[in-house]
Amino acid sequence: MEERLKEAPCGFISIDENGCVLEVNNRFLTWMGYEEDEVVGKHMETFLTRVNRMFIHTYFFPTIQLHNSVEEFYINLTTAAGESIPFLLNARRYMQEGLAVIDCMFIQMKQRIDYELELRSLQKTTEKAYQDREEAFVQLEKVYAEIARKQNEILEMNNELLKLSNTDKLTNISNRRFFQEELERHIDRYTKEGSVFSLLMVDIDHFKKVNDTYGHLAGDSVLVQLAGLLTQEMGPDDRVARLGGEEFVIILPETNAEEALKLAVKLNKAVENANWEIIDRLTVSIGASTFSESDTEVTILNCADLALYRAKENGRNCSIHYQEIG
């Protein structure tokens, strides 16, 4: 076995068509609590409950024989200590020196309690169906469909969790984590294609006075309304994110320094002229910077921050591009 596969971050076993283990990597041994000589040569049923053995023989092996692959198969394995661990199993069958070999990759699943309870209920239903041979096949078809549905729900839940991890909880726009990923992507695109882009760093003027005068709930309301206004004023390809506190940042693809400053000035006017729900008037200061060959992820942010600081010094409610002070 190659060293990279031996130390891969996912579990791996290679089995023959009878289900006997030919090779195993270190991650699988660690998860399952076995030594290599306790696994190689043993049937994979060693790690399975009775219900899962039935799944393996009624679905896994027939499918691998028919299609030479199985994707996203949900299965529970039992460790040497008797603990049940849920996995997603992907497998591929191929010929090696005239013999059929099946490579199996295991990825641990992180489940919510309600999903675990529902899946346990499905397993109990399966065990009952197994005991009642006359109804077993009818019940199994229903269980397979339900398991497939649950697997899809889990995958959808993971996608939703990813979306939530990239979203600011208060304003419902992108957060700092998403902004960092987008910034890296635009820098990579600039390096490969020379696609120019700019940043706008937006900070609310005298935001502390808003909180002190109207309260923090009112301040939160102002942040939410400003996030919506910035998103509305920007183009469909622009990325608006909240860095934290009262500070926002906007990535402007295909935008040079002159265009970036024009957009910043436009934002100043839009914010000043907006009808605010809580306060009578609000203004922002904006610092702009445009990526160049000498820039990095850190320097372009520093440039925008310096320009923002200069806009504050110039009386606020204005926009400054770093080129004007650099």
Image (cartoon, rainbow, N blue to C red):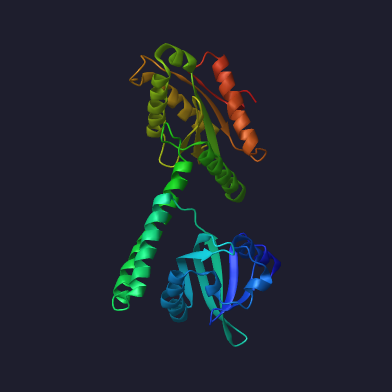
Q: Residue at x 39, y 55 (%)?
A: 117
**For residue 105, which quarter of the picture?**
bottom right
Q: Position of residue 121 (x, y in %)?
A: 36, 60
Quadrant containing the C terminus is top right
Q: Position of residue 264 (x, y in %)?
A: 48, 27
Q: Residue at x 52, y 60 (%)?
A: 85
Residue 1 visible in this rendered orientation of the protein: no
Q: Is residue 68 left or right of residue 22?
A: left
136, 227: nearer the viewer:
136
Quadrant containing the N terminus is bottom right
Question: Could you tell me how many numbered marks the image carries?
Answer: 0
77, 179: nearer the viewer:
77
Q: Is residue 62 above or below residue 184?
A: below
Q: Position of residue 239 (x, y in %)?
A: 47, 38
Q: Is residue 73 left or right of residue 136?
A: right
Residue 202 visible in this rendered orientation of the protein: yes
37, 189: nearer the viewer:
37
Q: Residue at x 43, y 36 (%)?
A: 173
